[in-house]
Amino acid sequence: MMAPYLGMSLYTWTAIIAVVLAGFSAGHWFGGWVAERNTARAYLWLAATMTLGAASTTASLWLVRLLSGPVLSLPMDRVAQISALTFAVFFLPSFCAGVPSPVLSKVAIDQAPHRAGRTLGLMFALSALGAIAGTLLAGFLFISWIGTSGTILAIAAVYLTLAVLFFSLGAKALRAIAASLALLLAAISGIAGLARIASPCDVESDYYCIRVVDMTEDLGVEARLLVLDHLGHGINLRDQPSGLVSPYVEIIDLLARAYLGENSDASAYFIGGGAYTLPRAWASSGWTGEITVAEIDPAVTAAAASSLWVDTSAFRIVHDDARAALSRQPAESLDVIVGDAFKDIAVPAHLMTREFAQLVERRLSSDGIYLMNLVDRGDRLTALFSMVTTLQQVFPVVEVWVDREQAAVSGRITFVILAAQRPSSSDRLWSLSDPDRQYLRWPAHDLDAKVAAAEVPILSDDFTPVDRLLNLQ
């Protein structure tokens, strides 16, 4: 639900977990108060709470859309924005989920006071088992099977079913029948309303909210952009497979071709497929070596094939985590490795470490090249400098390239990092599609001085604070 608006950073996960637990805790406290009523009245309180749970759960689908824009425009840091939006969307449904446990525990103890200890133990165990079952069903079944809206519908249906049950237990027969019919009518209406909710995603896969956006009007030729969660992952031109719209993609292309020279049968390995823009360009321009793409999500590959004009038969595709897949490659078997995997705006942490750089170095040929793109803020650059100093632990040459137009920007900048055994032959490159666009290499002496002055950490499997370095807060 949150990915299209907040991405999937560590801060997003942390805020969601904290808000849900806070809701449970407040619900438990309120449930303790309800448990002190007589049983019939307590059941009616539970019925009302479950009805509120159904309504707030259903409303969360609209709230996240209505509030995301205003909340994310507030003059607060990123962590405060994420926490505020998460609280507004998830606290009340979580609160309602926390209310029944103390009430039902009290009822069970009243029925068998001589077994109070075992009863409490059983209730705690059942609560934990329910949480485990809900986690497994949501993560492994419901979201992949019926999507986010369908999963929310299932939760609302559970709330309504419980509301009917508690009304029946707490009210007299006629009142219970009337309440049950009213709730069933509300459930049917809610189902009909939810069925009309349009998901912001074209596909909700096990990994991403996937959308394909038409860019024809913006670019003047038929083109489409792949969006994963809330980040663009490549633009493809239908009739120009070699056309590279994004500057960082063209920088990688130019550096690889300049470094490899006439070695057109070089073997290439892509960490992340996304829109398959560069693999598609290389396959269409006479690249005769094997091109391997490690893309963790088969649904992304399917979207590239069905909507982005990618002939996936031109590559060897491995649907697996890129690090795990790369570890199975023979040593010194690759001439170029391209790192283009992102989670939110960050490279996944396990693909930024010294240990991963060592794996890359072992898989490259003696004159191979590693190229990766990385997003950082122009007024901070701690993530960039950490990545540079980490790669310098493994490679004798580490260069940073950037589009000249972006070089002086204080906001987000996409850099390309080159790591190899020898330096590139030039300090600037010219775009093939726009002769006025230049790509510059950061002067080595200045880069080394700034990296040293920044006192950034070397990234390792044990310590890779990506979100903090990127200043996502």
Image: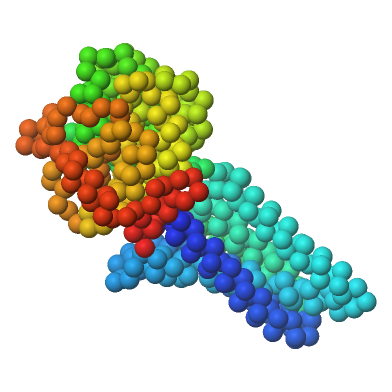
Q: Nearer the viewer, residue 23 or 67?
A: 23
Q: Nearer the viewer, residue 39 or 232?
A: 232
| Residue 73 versus residue 10 in the image, above or below | below
Side (left or right) of 303 relative to 98: left
Q: Residue at x 41, y 31 (%)?
A: 360
Residue 173 position within the rendered picture, expressed as x and y whole percent measured from the top left: 78, 76
Side (left or right) of 98 relative to 238: right
Q: Quadrant of residue 154?
A: bottom right
Can you name the residue that lies furthest to the left here? Answer: 436
Q: Quadrant of residue 26?
A: bottom right
Q: Quadrant of residue 21?
A: bottom right
Side (left or right) of 372 relative to 350: left
Q: Residue at x 93, y 77 (%)?
A: 114
| Residue 468 versus residue 336 in the image, above or below | below
- Quadrant of the image containing the C terminus: bottom left
Q: Nearer the viewer, residue 294 or 37?
A: 294
Residue 427 position within the rendered picture, expressed as x and y whole percent measured from the top left: 14, 34
The image's colouring method is rainbow
| Residue 412 versus residue 269 in the image, above or below | below
Residue 410 position within the rendered picture, expressed as x and y whole percent measured from the top left: 19, 57
